Amino acid sequence: MSISGRLSRFARRNSARPEIDARRAGIGILVVFLAPALLIYAGFTIYPVLRTFYNAFHAIKPHGVVEFVGLGNFTALLLADSIFWKAVSNTAIFTIVATIVDVFGGLLLALCLFARAPLAPLLRVVWFTPVLMSYVVVGIVWVWIYDYDWGLANAVLHWLGLGAYEQSWLGHPSTALSSVLVAHVWKWLGFNMIVFLAALHALPAEVLGAAELDNCGWLAKLVYIIIPMLRATIVNLLVLSFIGKMMVFDLIWIMTGGGPLWSTETVSTYVYKRAFEWNTFDLGYPSAIAVLWFIIILAFIAIMTRLLRQRDRLEF
Amino acid sequence: MHACFAMRSVAAVGLVTAAILGGVATKASAQNVTLEVWSHEADEPAKVAFRELAAKNLEKSRPGAKVKITWYEKNPLFAALKTALPAGKGPDVFYLEPDQVEYITASYVIPLDDLVNWNNIEPWARKVWTHNGKTYGIPQEAYTNELYYDKDALKKLGIALPANGQLTQAQFLEVAKKARAAGMTPISQGVGDRPYPGAYISGEALLRKLGPDDYQKLFTGKLSFADPRVVEVLKWVKELVDAGAYPKNFMTLKLGESHYYFYSKPGAVTLPMGSWYTGRAFVPEDKGGQPEKFPLGIMQYPAMDGGACNQCKTSAIGASFVINAASKQKELAAAFLNAMSTPEMGKMWIETVYLQTGIKADVKNFSGPHAAYFTELMDRQKGVTYFIGSPRDMVTGECKDTFAQVLNSAFPGGLLTVDQAVQMMNKSCYKG
Amino acid sequence: MATQMRLGFAQLRRLPLVLFVVLYSVVSGGPFLWVATMSLRTTAEIFKNPYGVPSPVHWEKFADAWTKSNYSTYFWNSATVVVVAVALVTVIGSMAAHCLARYRFRGNRFVRFLILSGLVLPPQLLILALFQILLDLDLYNTLTGLVIVYVATHIAMTVYILEGFFAQIPQDLFDAARMDGYSDFEIFWRVTMPIGAPAIFTTVTLNFIILWNEFLFAVVLLTDDAKRTLPLGIMHFTGSHQLDVGMVATGLMIAILPIILIYAFFSEAMIKGMTAGAVR
């Protein structure tokens, strides 16, 4: 971990003291430093966002035909689009479950290594490897793992004598979403583990030592001492993981394409489908989905920050 | 009539066409131009060779012209087209199938009536591509829905097929049950990457039960799926599904994998498929093709009890080519379409792809390593009444998506009851 | 005696821990090893026995993938796009971060907020409009267009990490530099950049990994086979009917290897890079 946020805030406040002029610069200098970033950011991030909002109120048809439809896209979306609501509920389930498993699974792994498991320094590096893999790689590998005929999942079940549980994991609506979720968690567990491990090593040793002396059980130690002390890290990771999962696209697109029977359709895959797969060629409706979803994400971030962070707010 | 698979002699017309083509060729300018073509079927060597030859022929007759064909798989091809065309970009010529009418309604492709030499094309095939009096695509591949089977496997089950290849619906159900009992998969089929294979059995059964007129009504929203005849058919399909007719990995098995599943590993008794099956099956075994000695047979789809048209069969147009409205060289593009559609090319198609075609072609004496197969295919066309077009050519919009999800996948996948399937289909398709 | 007993007990208690650690190592590393073995076997061999050891070892498959398939094109496309985009976003981002961290000016907070709000923008909100915009600019289906999009969408994260680090560089250094008569650019180049090098290295690794793996923007903004990046190229391969598992596995290894090689040498830097946003 670099230097903690508190320190940086302290440094900033400290240097806010009126100095000679090293903190001042002519407008020309500012422009030269900021312009490249601002221009490219404005042109290819802010403008697209605004244009998406504009699109959401229009029907964008082939050959440059643009029709104003007002709230038409939104009313259709909210009132008549059953696939959208299916996608919303799938995304919600995916986000909530994956976030919790990711963060607390990561904590568990970190605790294992923190408890001086053999080869901990090496395992730390090995367990992190899936984080570096692209979704394309992870997706394809897990599609193979779930393959009915020769996949690893069924082979392991078979080997364990649990042949009765062999099934087409991605082919049944009741298992498809959880199967994709497992692949997603597999990729990200190492990430959360590393962050927790860093936080654990930053804990003051005396506190843990004191708990040891009190003959505190490991569970009690975890619940009463470690978790409260890691609160900031946990909150940080929950929010981060939550945002990431609300936008999940790549892995699902590669593994199931949203099927079977829309059981893995997420908002992101649905946006893509409506834009480029359906036979409508209309960019307005999918833009409306993206806009609505963005507003929901923002609302969730606001609520989570308020609920979980209390005093320590998002840093920027 | 269309049914004769473009086998009749049209040599005279062909000669005339060749003359016309030659005339056009001399007029062509000598400047260097490249014609961009995007084609599906990258993994079917015979079709690749066919189209590359047509490209070479065109280049020969048009000095300075170059034809660049980019080979795609189906889904990536349409993903690329759906982003390129709204951009006013994309190739001059591309592959399309007749159910993809959205390209026509969005005016991404142009009418070919005055651009292409239609004398070489079967009128019934042209009709498939005709919308509001204009023709948008040049049909190349024609096919029938066939029920392939493994002759040895059927023998092993102790079932004798009548000479006309026709089983009743009860007999076919019996095949499925016996096969399962013997540890064999009765029907190899998968819907992992296509929106239609799962509906082969139910589609042909519905056609036979209802007859062409009501069948058409069913898929154009004018007949309810709750019609007792439809329900009877679906109940029979459900019996098949419950008997374990389809592979366990039906939902994720891809099209090509279902072929391999049928003839190699683990093997299946039957494979319902368009007759374009051979395009991928008749490649060398080490390239994933069918083993040389595989005892491939063709039976008729099961006869339905009280069926209105038990001699009915689906015939449809597959691979076709269209011209991008944004193309800057439409005339050259049309010349390429013509170069693919000469009688000589039609003959080559039948002889090398082992498949029917929308091109008029004269093939009297069929030879080659798969002559026996083609003879059997022709035998199975005797006395048949054709229905032109597959269900997915008839359904549109939400109904199309529901067809893909329900009749194609969830229902044969065993995830829905007959009532649920009827209800879901009616909700998005029935307008009565 | 008592301590010994406790030790023995502790040892026993460690058994589940060790078992769990072994099990998770198999789960996290197993799939990767499996793909590695498959990349050296032919599809026929794989279908015969999916979990066999490669024998004989088909090293030539890598050469085949590289020469006969388009993997070399995909690889160089990815390399070009990622190297150029990372270089640009690093330079542009550190300039902006330096400016925001060092200078007090009217609108500082607003600019900061504007740029950092990019952290919460879902790509889906951008992608459709970016598609239209690149079309308007004739940059659709070009690697240049993809580079621009990559730079624009990764400025926020880069500035976020760098600005935090730059702000911690003691002000005295800058005051001293100013006294020595350094110009604003010299201060950036000779003070901020060298001292901020670890943070810059962190953003470079982070951006490199993310962009090397990027899929959504590439799939929408590129169509030509000759312009595909590696993730798209691999997807193209799996779309095939006759799924050539062995060849796809080889392709996967080609996509993974650069990352793994760098990771072998710079694992700490890469771990730090990937988690930089979360830890700060």
Image (cartoon, rainbow, N blue to C red):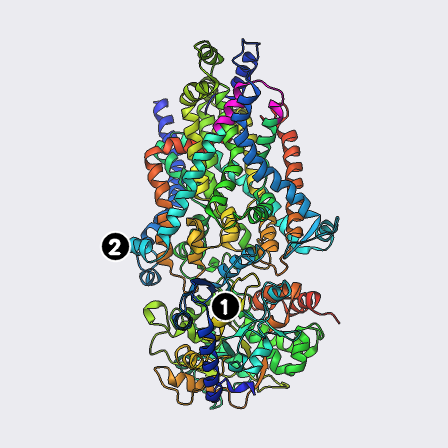
Residue A210 screen position, x and y as percent: 47, 18
Please state if C45 lies on the left or on the right of B212 as rendered.
left
Say whether residue A163 is visible: yes
Q: Please state the extent of the stretch shown in magenta in the rendering.
A: C94-110
What secondary structure is found at the residue carrying circle 1? helix
Q: Main secondary structure of the magenta part?
A: helix
Residue, x 44% and y 26% (percent of image)? C199
Say if mark 1 contacts mark 2, CB within 8 Å: no
Chain letter for the residue marked with disc 2 in the picture: C
Q: Is residue B229 above or below residue C61?
A: below
Q: Residues within 10 Å of mark 2 (few under 14, many from 20)?
A: some
Chain letter for the residue marked with disc 1 in the picture: B
For label 1, the residue is: B333
In the rendered structure, does residue C97 fall within the stretch colored magenta?
yes
Residue, x 38% and y 58% (percent of image)? C245
Residue pushed farthest left?
C56
Q: Is residue C19 above or below residue B51?
A: above
- Identify the amino acid type marked 2: Val
What secondary structure is found at the residue carrying circle 2? loop
Disc 1 to disc 2, how far (Cα)? 47 Å
Residue, x 57% and y 68% (percent of image)? B408
Please state if B13 lies on the left or on the right of A293 as rendered.
left
Residue C51 screen position, x and y as percent: 33, 56
Q: Is residue C109 above or below residue A283?
A: above
Compare residues A137 and B243 and report the one nearer the observer. Answer: A137
In the rendered structure, does residue B111 fall within the stretch colored magenta?
no
- Identify the amino acid type marked 1: Ala
For label 2, the residue is: C57
Residue C243 screen position, x and y as percent: 41, 62
Residues flagged by tags 1 and 2 on a common chain = no
Residue C151 screen position, x and y as percent: 50, 37
